[in-house]
Image: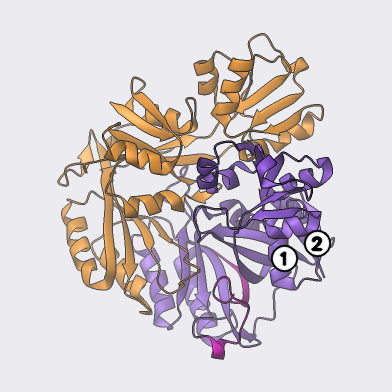
Chain colours: A orange, B purple
Amino acid sequence: MKAAFQGVHGAYSELASKQLLGSRVRTLPCESFADVFDAVAGGAAERGILPIENSLAGSIHQNYDLLLDRDLHIVGEAYLKVEHALLCHPSASLRAITEVRSHPQALAQCSGFFAKNKGIKPAPYFDTAGAAESLAREAPIHIGAIASAYAAELYGLKVLKRNLQNHADNFTRFLAVAKRPLPAKRSTTAGLPFKTSLAFMPKRNAVGSLHAILGVIAGRGIDLLKIESRPNPLSPFEYWFYADLAGGPGALAVAQALRELEPLVSRLKILGGYPRAPRAGSRPVPANRSKHA
Amino acid sequence: MKAAFQGVHGAYSELASKQLLGSRVRTLPCESFADVFDAVAGGAAERGILPIENSLAGSIHQNYDLLLDRDLHIVGEAYLKVEHALLCHPSASLRAITEVRSHPQALAQCSGFFAKNKGIKPAPYFDTAGAAESLAREAPIHIGAIASAYAAELYGLKVLKRNLQNHADNFTRFLAVAKRPLPAKRSTTAGLPFKTSLAFMPKRNAVGSLHAILGVIAGRGIDLLKIESRPNPLSPFEYWFYADLAGGPGALAVAQALRELEPLVSRLKILGGYPRAPRAGSRPVPANRSKHA
């Protein structure tokens, strides 16, 4: 199995591909999210791995746009805890470090470290994994990088400190996309319940149209796991909603609800039905062993 | 009037402060969003200016967290079109440029430009305005920056190209926050209708609780302008919703709906009532002159 991801080897997206598809998955680095879709659609990879929302930074609308525009299907999800580590070349030490490279967002997420270490200058870089790779290539003894411990392992670097980030709870949700959807009839896999992701556009200007739509979902006893309106400042009365429902698209209640939604929406797209990730940070466990898994 | 914003002079947030409060507003650059809240709470500035959602990158949950945790109130909003320009020192020219500095996200948003100009290397920087400032300071003739045309004006730089970004429709919504809310009874200002932003947590584990909540809103004939669930991967069944309603918190229908919501939620916070921004990109016009303003 080969998985395409945006970034360079060692990126958090590559780590997510291993969490989703096992440590033996082969990976294909891509320059952009659109390239990830192209790689899967063109057959260069069987899966695409996409960040879709982050607990601090929100939903990545760009990837929802691609899911709406292209014909790939969500077949899996995973939550990854973003744990930034301070890395250096094996011959370097913390005492010698005067500069630390990383993506500006990662540098900002570790501002507490720089406040405590005034002698260390943050240096912006394209991405966390690229900063790690540059240390392996250039072997400087006075420069560090902020990236994952996984990137350290990959590039043969030393981990000086773990959990450098200010906020302990920084999670990113990743999706796996594929050319073909999972069989619609499945509603559990190895004890994991399914969920269905969809996007819809309520009929224009109808006050309460969302209420009617949620009435259909609630009326069938389906749990709503996510709901989000997509801002469209150019046309504020015509907007997409993203929703995640408990249950696969082939489960009776979900299938009935989807049929009942049709007259209430001007557009509707099922983005995929797939096993629901267990609680963040934990390994997959059968649903009967963890109430909220 | 003084407005605090995150970033350095020339940032898009500073430009938003001028759109919201007029070109004569004085501004106070802050290092973090939390510092913006501190500046307003401590009296160093009367307003804080915060990006809250972007049409490509989504809602900035960090700022919602601060709105929930701190005691400031939303008193205004504005949509700003993100228009990246290519800037250089006045003595430089496009032909001489071999490197362009900017925030990695802005560099990625202008990837089409770099694909067409293979001789120009993108160079990551902390922020767009800081990249512009560095050109003014260092006066290199072979380095450009991607930032707003406003940053060029501020730092005396030359605008080589406008609208460098791949996507024409990149908007950021900004909020103005203040120590005291606007008078609750107001529901229009100079012909602009109000909106009310709130955050609520439905009673735990109640299937259809969001449906009941939206029923209260729809039942009062109130338009829902935004709804979004805040992902909480650590506790997937206990989550906040953000909602924007048409109408000020003192408007009869909204006030009644807010009272009716109380038994349905375990937590509820009114984040503010404020004049609704007109359609993105346009200047404020009275509501009777623009249907959707």
Q: Is residue B68 or residue B264 the one in the foreground? A: B68
Q: Position of residue A268 (x, y in %)?
A: 27, 62
Amino acid type indicated by mark 1: Ser
Residue in view at x 56 percent, y 69 percent: B197
Q: x and y percent of residue B35 in the render?
A: 75, 51
Q: Tag 2 or tag 1, which sits nearer the N-term?
A: 1
Q: Quadrant of residue A16?
A: top left
The amino acid on which the numbered mark 2 sits, given as a three-letter code, is: Thr
The answer to whether mark 1 and mark 2 are in CB contact below 8 A is yes
Magenta residues, as a range?
Answer: B268-290
Q: Is residue A136 left or right of residue A97?
A: left
Q: Which mark is residue B27?
A: 2
| Percent position of residue B283, x then y | 63, 77
Q: Nearer the viewer, residue B240 or B153?
A: B153
Give left or right: position of A20 versus B183: left
Residue named by callout 1:
B17
Hey, which quadrant is residue B77 in on the image?
bottom right
Q: Quadrant of residue B162?
A: bottom right
